[in-house]
Image (cartoon, rainbow, N blue to C red):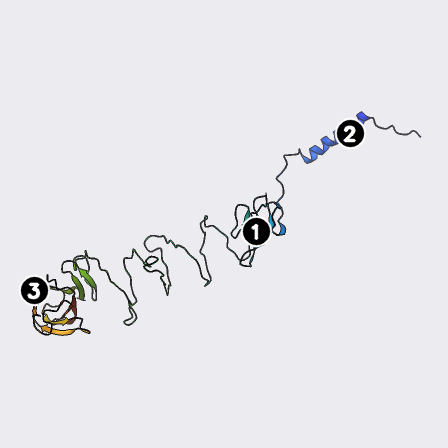
Amino acid sequence: MAQPSRPSTGDIDQIFTAIRIRLGALTGSRGAAGPPGPKPLIWKGTWTDDTDYELGDIVKLDTAGSSTLTYLCIDAHTSSGNPPVPGGNTQWHEISPGYLIIDGSRAMTGDLNMDSHEIDNILNAHVVGGVGDGVIDGVRVIHMAGDDDDGEARIDGLERTIFNDEPTKSVIENPSVVKFNPAVTADADTTPALGQLSYDTQERTLVTYVTADGCVSFDVSWHCVGGFPASIVVDSVTVGGGSGNYTYSWRLYAFGDEDTGTLVATSSDALPTFDISGPPVSNQLCSGWLYLDLHDADVDVDHAWSSLMDCNCV
């Protein structure tokens, strides 16, 4: 039986070409190479110096506080005395469990719920918002830290501080000085309200509002003889509110207020003059307190007062 002839080299080339054409028709032409697959994350153990690190390598490093932090390589490099640092740097990103590592460059997209935990070591807190915004709510204690040595502890820019309405609980304690606005004119720049206290630049005294639509204030001057105070004259009394049927009760205390001073004179005149040239002051009164207890036919009103701190005799 005759053996089949072996195909020639030319026949083999034709067969291969035919098969390639047939396969190309079935599978389509070959396109450009696709991107490489994702780089696997590789645990490299403890960071070491003089070591090649690739993208995706993970290392650990102990800190001075005996805690172990974990880092992800984000820039291939050879270590050379440049270990990763807490928070990360240009070559490492910290991925330690339980740590929130962000730089704040991206805005938050939702609320931050601290679940009753603290926020510590804040340098500055800047609140923004228009009317009705910028609210810090539910605060029980604000503890200020500051003195003359390292700067004032202060809250500035306030327009109003509102206390609760409990009669025995709203207290301002231990102020060294209360500074009023010296440009205020009582009843002109302020709206009278019961219990309101302000400074009056015209009368140069404190004004106590004793009714919902009025106030009581007075101004005094010193009359001196031979360089010593001889009398105190009430020059004017400003009264607002009530029926206008007022009665006056003046009390003059030397060397202190009604609790610490000596009562030296009283008067029921509207504009009294107090002679202080005789005992017990004997030309020595350069400080004291003058009180006005004012009453009208409809309602008893609280008193106004003025501190006499300088006799102004030269």
Mark 1 Cα shell of 10 Å, populated few (<14), some (14-19), many (≥20): many
Residue 104: image x %, image y %?
Answer: 45, 50
The amino acid beneath tag 3 is Cys
Mark 2 Cα shell of 10 Å, populated few (<14), some (14-19), many (≥20): few
Q: Look at the picture and state if 234 lies above or below 279.
A: above
Left or right, residue 7 beside residue 45? right
Outermost residue toward the left?
225
Q: Which residue is mark 1?
A: 71
Which dot, 1 or 3, sits closer to the camera? 3
Q: Quadrant where the N terminus lies?
A: top right
Label 3, label 2: how many angstroms apart (C-alpha)?
136 Å
Q: Foreground: 264 or 33?
A: 264
Left or right, residue 82 beside residue 18? left
The amino acid beneath tag 2 is Ile
Left or right, residue 108 beside residue 84? left
For the point 72% across and 34% down, which residue is it? 23
Label 1, label 3: how many angstroms apart (C-alpha)?
85 Å
Return the mark for residue 224.
3
Q: Foreground: 165 or 306?
A: 306
Residue 193: image x %, image y %?
Answer: 20, 64
Return the mark for residue 137.
none
Return the mark for residue 15.
2
Kindly state the secondary structure of the residue where label 2 is placed: helix
Residue 207: image x %, image y %?
Answer: 17, 63
Kindly state the secondary structure of the residue where label 1 is placed: strand
Residue 261: image x %, image y %?
Answer: 17, 73
From this viewpoint, is residue 232 visible?
A: no
The image quarter in which residue 203 lies: bottom left
The amino acid beneath tag 1 is Tyr
Q: Look at the picture and state if 248 lies above or below 128.
A: below
Which dot, 3 or 2, sits closer to the camera? 3
For the point 20% across and 62% down, which residue is it? 198
